[in-house]
Amino acid sequence: MTMNIVVLGPPGVGKGTYSGFLSKKYGIPNISVGDLFRNAIKKQTELGKRIKNYVSIGDLVPDEIVIELVKNRLEEADCKNGFLLDGYPRTVPQAEAMMKFKKIDVALNFVAPDEVIMDRIGGRRTCSKCGAIYHIKNVPPTIEGICDNCTGRLVQRADEKPEVIKNRLEVYREKTKPVADYLRRKDMVVEIDANYPIEEIDKIIAQCEKRISELS
Ligand SMILES: [Zn+2]
């Protein structure tokens, strides 16, 4: 049995956190395409140099480059028993390519209402000095607006302001809908209800574990 898992869901739904749990539990790597980009750029690999050309001018990295990068990564030894893949596929051609080079067992689609996501991202505050992250409700600092670690000032990042989050959610939906529809037609998508507070994260993880245990 393999656990080749694709992770879907809007920004702020908590994919990174859930994937981290599942990665530890099953001993499979947690692969983020964003990290693959950053690593390739840092190491100045051939692909990295090409990626940098697009990223530096704010352009989307073309499918053929993303496909090659992900394909190479999934061929590494640590993916033998499975992987969690976040940030791929983002387009239908990427999804079609994946069907050829790797069997995907399931796509976990994390869903939560927009208001909940707005609240999660919109409540984040970042220390302007040390980068520590707080949340006004879930992880408040001892003194409002001040970092516990270094007494730096806490600020709201520009891309975490409500109107920007709203736009990010709309862009996400518009861009990923064709991919989600494609995977649904292949009967690969299972919906995971991520509408639980952080204290009840086990309820979200349990849904994933149940789905993964049903894989053959
Ligand atoms: Zn700080």
Image (cartoon, rainbow, N blue to C red):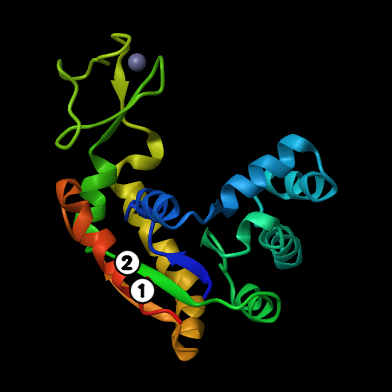
Rendering quadrant holding ligand 1: top left
Instruction: Give the residue displayed 50% in from the left and 77% down from the top.
Output: 105
**Circle 2: residue type:** Glu
Identity of the residue furthest to the top in this view:
151
Residue identified by numbered label 1: 213
Within 10 angstroms of label 2, few (less than 14), some, or many (20 or more) residues? Answer: few
Q: Which quarter of the picture shows residue 102?
A: bottom right
Q: Residue 64: give x, y in percent of width and height.
A: 76, 67
When the figure is inspected, residue 207 is found, relative to residue 154, above or below; the finding is below
Marks 2/1 in contact by CB < 8 Å: the verdict is yes
**Which element type, helix, strand or loop, lies under badge 2?**
helix
Q: Is residue 6 left or right of 195 when viewed as pictured? A: right
Q: Is residue 216 left or right of 92 when viewed as pictured? A: left
Count of numbered labels shown in the rendering: 2
Q: Does the image show residue 215?
A: yes
Identity of the residue furthest to the front in this view:
1
- The numbered mark at residue 209 is 2
Q: Which quarter of the picture shows residue 169?
A: bottom left
Q: Of residues 28 and 162, which is closer to you in this image?
A: 28
Q: Does the image show residue 194?
A: no
